[in-house]
Image: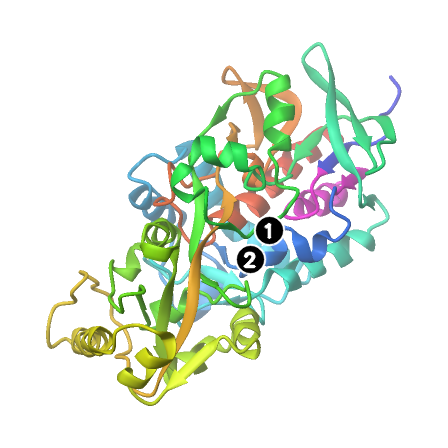
Amino acid sequence: MTAPDFDLVVAGGGGGLVAALHAAESGANVLVVEADEHFQRGNNTSMCTAMIPAAGTRWQHAAGVQDSPDRFLGDITRKTGGTADQRVARALTDVSAALVSWLADVQGLDLELVTDFRYPGHTADRCHTIPGRHGSRLLRHLVERVRANPRIELIAPMALREVDTADGRVTGVEIATPDGRREHLTAAAVLLATNGFGGDRDLVHRHMPEIADAHYHGGQYSRGDALRIGRQLGADAGFLDAYQGHAALSSRSQTLVGWATVVHGGVIVDGSGRRFAPETTGYSEFAALLAARPGSAGWIVIDEHIEELCSTFDDFRTVAESGSLIRAATATALAERIGVPAAALEDELTAAHRAATGTEPDRQGRTDTRHPLTAPYTAIAVKPALFHTQSGLVVDEHARVLAGGTPIPGLYAAGGAAVGISGHGAGGYLAGNGLLSALGLAFLAAAHVSSAVTA
């Protein structure tokens, strides 16, 4: 039998690079094709905060954090109301510690455990990140490792158009350049890692209308290619209403302000100067709440202490440098500067301070332990955004794409191309779900491909 041109073709230059690197370790010859010439600054991996949730890691042990895959799975189950794909969630929570160890020990990624704040829904400090806490640094590192590996070829811009099969098994791919030149290559396996369909407004309107008119802050090439290709092969799809929204995108700079502003003690008000929901519901579901307010916009209000804490994020520093931070010595002066009723804003900030100090219940039912806001204040104009969809092709614990519940031999999916672990809608999203699905499913897919290569 003639050897294929490649053992694995990876479509997508984000989290799929993990699969390329992991498979190459076992001797696989890998091709990575990426449709976006500028993917290192334009795909969802590059735009994220580089938070990788993992349970039972050595970083947690060193910090005295008690955690386990079972506990992590329990958090996912609670956040999704039991609707998450349990097989995929179990596979990802189980492999999460091995994934971050491999990223650090084999790929040389400088990882650290985030202990200065905790995102809503996580019951343990389990988000691992890199200095600067920005996905562009993570992606740049992976790209450098890929380009240095003699077994991996990376081509951009180059898009996957079709997956070829024979007798129900993957046999190759059709790839194309932006000017339409096409080429067929033989391949034993294909990983669809092209993200979801956030860039296709028609699909977004069909499946998640409550966020469809919000700003899309994701990769422009996330147009549902994996869904199209998978469905042509009879693949199952699921959770098509699931997505990650965000309520903390700077209206001025179009940069992520970050939910750490809120977790540390910040509050969000609308154009009336009033809070309207408990901010600790989570930034994904809060996006739809903000989108429903008059003007679909609001303000995050923090103070100097929180501003300093958030300066560890590259994104927040970018927002600050853009002139998006509006400061004032008093609530009345801040209200004047941002154009909201002074009496309402002063009343809300005073009440929020009392709630944070425990002298009265929080008006919106917020129950977290947080820093009490203290003048002088800082306000940042924010708008809701759709970051990426959290749905796609149904996969098993090896990231194999299923058709009628049965794996399509040689076809895999990861990240936004796969069903993910966020259940339905926006409310099931836990911080890091998207990146864990992208990196973790790619890691699992590569391990399964490698077992065939070395057999």
Question: Which residue corresponds to the image point at 86% horizontal and 48% vertical from the top-left?
Answer: 150
Cα–Cα gap, marks 2 and 1: 6 Å
**Residue toward you, 388 or 370:** 388
Describe the colour scheme in one phrase: rainbow
Please give the residue where the numbered disc 2 appears in the rendered image. Answer: 48
Q: Which residues are magenta?
A: 11-34
Is 455 a magenta residue?
Answer: no
Vertical arrangement, residue 18 with respect to residue 358, above or below: above
Quarter holding residue 189: top right
Residue type, mark 2 in image: Cys
- Res 279 label: none
Q: Position of residue 76 (x, y in %)?
A: 36, 45
Element on which disc 2 rests: loop
Binning the other alpha carbons within 10 Å of mark 2 as few (below 14), some (14 to 19) or many (20 upward) gives many
Quadrant of the rendering where the C terminus is positioned? top right
Q: Amino acid at mark 1?
A: Asn
Q: Name the residue beneath numbered marker 1.
A: 44
In this view, which residue lies farthest toward the bottom? 329
Q: Quadrant of the N terminus?
A: top right
Q: Is the residue under label 1 in contact with that under label 2 (CB below 8 Å)? A: yes
